[in-house]
Image (spheres, helix red, strand yellow):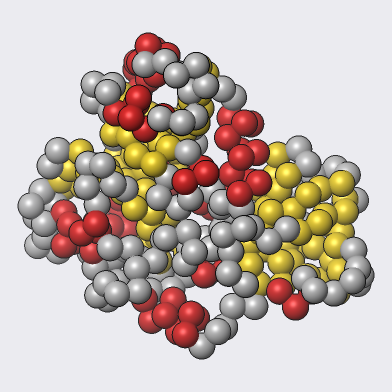
Amino acid sequence: MSDLRYVLLPHRGVLSLSGEDRRTFLQGLVSNDVTKVAPDRAIHAAFLTPQGKFLHEFFIIEQGDTLLLEGEAERLDDLRRRLSMYKLRSKVVIEVRPDLAVAALLGEGAEAAAAKIEGAAAFTDPRLAAAGARVLLPGDSAAASLEQAGFARAELDEWDRLRLRLGLPDGSRDMVIEKAILLENGFDELNGVDWKKGCYMGQELTARTKYRGLIKKRLMPVEIDGPAPAPGTPILFGEAEAGEMRSSAGSLGLAIIRLEYLDKDGIFTAGEARVTPHKPDWANF
């Protein structure tokens, strides 16, 4: 238990869906299969434009008669508004839950330890086991509850560096709203798309991208030698534009890189820094 650590994620928040139609309503809108969600099993999914471009990403977990969506805190009102546009006569109530906090959990047995906390919804990160676990729990006592359960507090930088090494995007920090495509950002390998479920918003472009082999660039970790480039900084291979920086922490970052340049001899630069891309172990390209 001494190795258990928690990191509060203030930039993440929770939206709840209740009502008897909550599953069928959400099933027709998101990229993953909502029927697989259970109290002990979360999924990662995205909500797209009708043209298949990124709008929101979130984890979905079940707690009692409610589905909890953990997504970007500052954009929960936008997600609620967009989902409500498709509500029609569905019996579903969509609410932002400011009473709940989000924490990332590190260490063996983290999910089991957090699940014992009253009012908590804990789950292993469904994208990659190496990313640890998450817990949604009452915000007014989150830190005290986790420490009583045997967790030691860690700083946000520890979590950020872990996800950067693993190549995991963090919402709109790494995916441009209304422009990013799921498969360029690892959603296939990271269990964020179900290819056997029925139709959902943006399915046509997502499927066409996969089956026609249209992926020309990918999000991947980069080592940064020099001052960290701001998100959006062009990445150059010689004089050719080969990609664009996303989020970073110290000498680690994520960048979208054109695949045609990965096997060539040369140097990638971004601003005043040299960047070295690395293909994640889980990636298939």
Q: Is residue 21 visible?
A: yes
Pick the front one: 63 or 278:
278
User: What residue lies at 52% left-to-right and 70% top-to-bottom?
Assistant: 183
Q: Quarter of the image containing the N terminus?
A: top left
User: What residue lies at 80% left-to-right and 62% top-to-bottom?
Assistant: 235
Q: Is residue 31 left or right of residue 151?
A: left
Pick the front one: 70 or 106:
106
Q: Is residue 196 left or right of residue 146?
A: left
Question: Image quarter for residue 232?
Answer: bottom right
Q: Is residue 205 visible?
A: no
Q: How many marks?
A: 0
Q: Is residue 216 left or right of residue 56?
A: right
Give the answer, above or below, for where 193 lies relative to 212: above
Question: Image quarter for residue 14?
Answer: top left
- Quick one: which residue is furthest to the bottom in this view? 212
Q: Residue 162: where, in percent of width, then height?
A: 61, 40
Q: Residue 260: where, in percent of width, then height?
A: 75, 78
Q: Residue 148: where, in percent of width, then height?
A: 37, 11
User: What residue lies at 20% left-to-right and 59% top-to-bottom?
Assistant: 35
Q: Residue 219: where, in percent of width, then height?
A: 63, 62
Pick the front one: 55 or 159:
159
Pick the front one: 3 or 241:
3
Give the answer, above or below, for where 26 lies relative to 76: below
Q: Is residue 4 left or right of residue 161?
A: left
Q: Quarter of the image containing the C terminus?
A: bottom right
